[in-house]
Amino acid sequence: MKTIGDMKIGETAKVARLHGEGAVKRRIMDMGLTKGAQVTVRKVAPLGDPIELTVRGYELSIRKDEAAKVEVE
């Protein structure tokens, strides 16, 4: 299982599955990270948190724990 947190800078993948429950999963989906969405890692902070992504044509920064809940293929 590969997650957004495992991706390298410049790598592109497709969201395969979301993990988590309730409000956490809803928040991730509200940010545009839904099944089938294409995600590109733009930048990673020096300590790995946050991670800047391009999703659906806009820039999005998410925390490491949120990135670990988004499985990609």
Image (cartoon, rainbow, N blue to C red):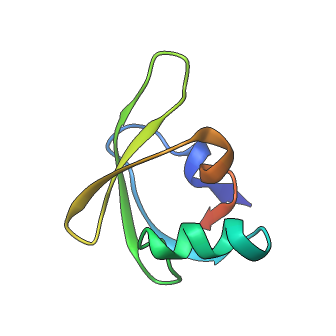
Number of disc labels: 0
Quadrant assignment, res 18: bottom right
Between 73 and 28, the one lying in front of the other is: 28
Q: Quadrant of the N terminus?
A: bottom right
x and y percentages locating residue 39 in the rendered image: 38, 63
x and y percentages locating residue 16 in the rendered image: 59, 77
Please indicate, yes or no, whether residue 6 appears anywhere in the rendered image. yes
x and y percentages locating residue 33 in the rendered image: 48, 71
Between 57 and 36, the one lying in front of the other is: 57
Please indicate, yes or no, whether residue 73 appears anywhere in the rendered image. no
> Residue at the spot x=49%, y=34% of the render?
50
- Residue farthest along the top direction in this orientation: 46
Q: Quadrant of the C terminus?
A: bottom right
> Does residue 11 appear left or right of residue 19 in this picture?
left
Q: Is residue 30 above or below residue 44?
A: below
Q: Is residue 46 above or below residue 59?
A: above
Between 60 and 11, the one lying in front of the other is: 60
> Residue at the spot x=63%, y=52% of the render?
66
x and y percentages locating residue 64 in the rendered image: 61, 40
